[in-house]
Image (tube, grey):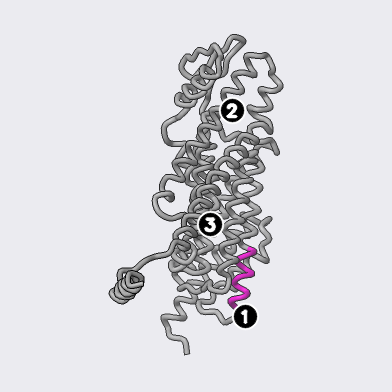
Amino acid sequence: MATRHELCRDARLCALAKMCSGYLQNRYNWLLQPPLLTCLKFMTFQKASAPQEKSHYIMLLILIGIISAIYIKVLSDYNQTAHLGMSLLFVLSCGLLLWERRTSLHLARSRSEFYLGLIGLVFTLSWGGFLLSQGASQGGQTLNLQGQPGINALIRMFPVFGGFALVLLASGWNGLRQFWRELVILLALGLPGTLSAFIADISPLTARFSTALLWYGGFDVVRDGLKIFLEGGGVEVYYGCSGMESVTYILGLSVLCLIMFPLSGWKRYFIPLVGMIIGFVVNGIRVSLMAILVSSGNRAAFDYWHTGDGSLIFGLLAVVVFGSFYLSIQTLEQRQQQLAQATPTYTDSPELTQELQAFLETEDDQ
């Protein structure tokens, strides 16, 4: 027989589930309501048998698919092609980690933890609905994030809060320890780009670096603040061209690599720093190239490398350079470990010393 306390707790849970279901049904009628509500119904079990636990996995996959669909649509509305590619890489990495540990995952949480996860899920869906409404208000036109740090932060942190909500639904507070790698990967995807919008602008540093590259390259270059002048024209380094986005992407990628392919010792600490330097240097080369194109009067080439596919090529170049560097460091570490294992070790045991002395005495007698 259920106690009075348990009946009251179940009644509160039922009321909360109905309230959240009604809210989702009224506000997000396009979100495949039957699958979503079925997910919440199946996941209200505190302890699941083997068939129920399998159903939990299926329902979690459906919820992940819904949140991912919202996220992809938002990135498409804001023309965040580069961030979409990075997001796919990070999400696939999380999926690979989960697949490797699929037999050891444990789904169990209390009712209160389910409440928090459900509230987090509603909050995440509301968050996504707000971002989608911003795109719908523009009549299908591509939106621009420049000068909108708040919207940029909402987009970058959307998968992070979605991941926290799903972890609470699946495993409660213990899931934070069970899924810490996946949560750190999602944080590395969104947090650096969010914080970069509120810290100091590195455009002056980028302008100085690009000017130095042009000067060492033999060009007659003059810098006036953020403006770089050559003989035939010049460019001005705005925040969007400062390289901060490239720096944050490579910083997040370094965290991803350290989790997926860990290194030992001091190398773990300088890898993110080297990644940020690589992102900054590659972007500085891009700014120098654009200044040369403007001075030569090649406007079409300038537009291509500034806002066209050329800008994505430089981002890909930074990723390739960092990936090659990380692979070389990992290969060097593996060779050092193999060499250490292959090197014979000697002990100063008394038995070995006596045997060696006896052997030398025998040789002397002969």
Of 19 and 333, nearer the camera is 333
Question: Which amino acid does the dot numbered 1 rest on?
Answer: Pro
Mark 1 packing: few (<14 Cα in 10 Å), some, or many (20+)? few
Which comes before the other along the chain, label 3 or label 1?
A: 1
Mark 3 and mark 1: Cα distance apart in space: 31 Å
**Is 9 situated above or below 89?**
below
Of 361 and 6, nearer the camera is 361
Q: Please identify the quadrant where the C terminus is shown.
A: bottom left
Residue 323 vs residue 110: left or right?
right
What residue did someone put label 2 on?
286
Toward the bottom, the furthest residue is 1
Question: Which amino acid does the dot numbered 2 rest on?
Answer: Arg
Point out which mark residue 37 bears.
none
What residue did someone put label 3 on?
260
Q: Is 53 colored magenta in this rendering?
A: yes
Residue 366 visible within the image: yes
Which comes before the other along the chain, label 1 or label 2?
A: 1
Mark 2 packing: few (<14 Cα in 10 Å), some, or many (20+)? many
Of 135 and 87, nearer the camera is 87
Are the residues at dot 3 and dot 2 in contact (C-beta closer than 8 Å)? no
What residue did someone put label 1 on?
51
Give the x, y percent position of residue 211.
50, 19
